[in-house]
Image (tube, rainbow, N blue to C red):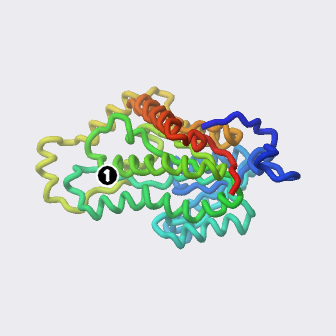
Amino acid sequence: MSDTTDPGTTDPGTTDPGTTDPGTTDSARTVLITGAGSGFGALSARALARAGHTVYAAMRDTAGRNAPRVAEARAYAAEHRVDLRTVELDVLSQESADAAVATVLAETGRLDVVVHNAGHMVTGPTEAFTPQELAAVYDTNVLGTQRVNRAALPHLRVRGHGLVLWVGSSSSRGGTPPYLAPYFAAKAAMDALAVSYAAELARFDIETTIVVPGAFTSGTNHFASGGHPAERTVLPAYEERYGALMDQVGARLAALAPADADVSLVADAIVEVVGTPHGRRPFRVHVDPANDGSAEVSAVADRVRTEFLTRIGLADVLTPHRTAA
């Protein structure tokens, strides 16, 4: 996602005289990243802090279950002399999201980047999940991003600048093995939401990037901590036909990935996007060692989106910029 504006200058037609673009003169940014207690979130929070940013690693139950992770983050910050902080944020609660953003603004006076990373995976035959269980996955992976956006975007819109970075999944458009449907469906919905937001935020000069990890079978606890259907009556029928399907899928995905594939690649990609000058960030970045085809399909979808918006006279929403109110 890029335009032709020089990131080291101000645009006299869109910036008040005597002011500078808050995102182009200071390479250190204030970043809020959700679901940062473990996995991609924790790795990305630490990598962003090492890159010189002020990072708020958001997680829920910081005084209880995640208290050890808060202590680990504090120790990491002290050892590496970086600005890594933690903040209570449960994406299932609008009050919690509002409070987290308020804390960031009270302590730093600014918020430059929101990273939607929080997510929850479940595995099992799709039929076995109740509608309520599917809704719970959707609540975390999709509605959670909406709660955080509703807390953060008023500040970014008034400021007229910022980046919303979504951590998606190659499952949205790539090859999808069975037994992961609730997660895949939620991630696809989140991707659709991110694409719509991109156009709606462009005229506020708020940029969008979707980072798309593939299947990393080690280095995170996605599969180990994933949920399962509570209702067990239909499972025997599937076990008879499909057996140890998830073990088979995991082994074959691991075999497809190069030996040097590491989850830190996702954190590296996020750091690179955040550090890229405003207006020059890519719309979508794939980090997929197994190459499940998502990049090819997304390239077509994103090209069609670009062409269609141009045909209907909305080419300007393909890049962030400032417009008069």
Q: Quadrant of residue 171?
A: top left
Question: Viewed as shown, does residue 55 lie left or right of 170?
Answer: right
In the image, 273 versus 308, the foreground residue is 308
Coordinates of residue 143 in the picture (x, y in percent): 44, 60
Q: Is residue 165 above or below residue 177?
A: below
Figure quadrant of the N terminus: top right
Residue depicted at 39% across the width and 42% down the height: 172
Coordinates of residue 74 in the picture (x, y in percent): 66, 59
Residue depicted at 24% across the width and 61% down the height: 130
Residue depicted at 79% across the width and 43% down the height: 11
Q: Disc 1 on helix, strand or loop?
A: helix
Coordinates of residue 112 in the picture (x, y in percent): 68, 54
- Density class for disc 1 (Cα within 10 Å; few <14, some 14-19, many ≥20) is many
Residue 33 visible within the image = yes
Residue depicted at 57% across the width and 48% down the height: 165
Q: Quadrant of residue 120?
A: bottom left
Q: Which residue is mark 1?
A: 182
Question: Viewed as shown, does residue 177 lie left or right of 85?
Answer: left
Residue 79 visible within the image = no
Coordinates of residue 180 in the picture (x, y in percent): 30, 46
Figure quadrant of the C terminus: bottom right
Q: Quadrant of residue 27?
A: top right
Amino acid type, label 1: Pro
Q: Is residue 37 above or below residue 252?
A: below
Question: Viewed as shown, does residue 287 lie left or right of 186?
Answer: right
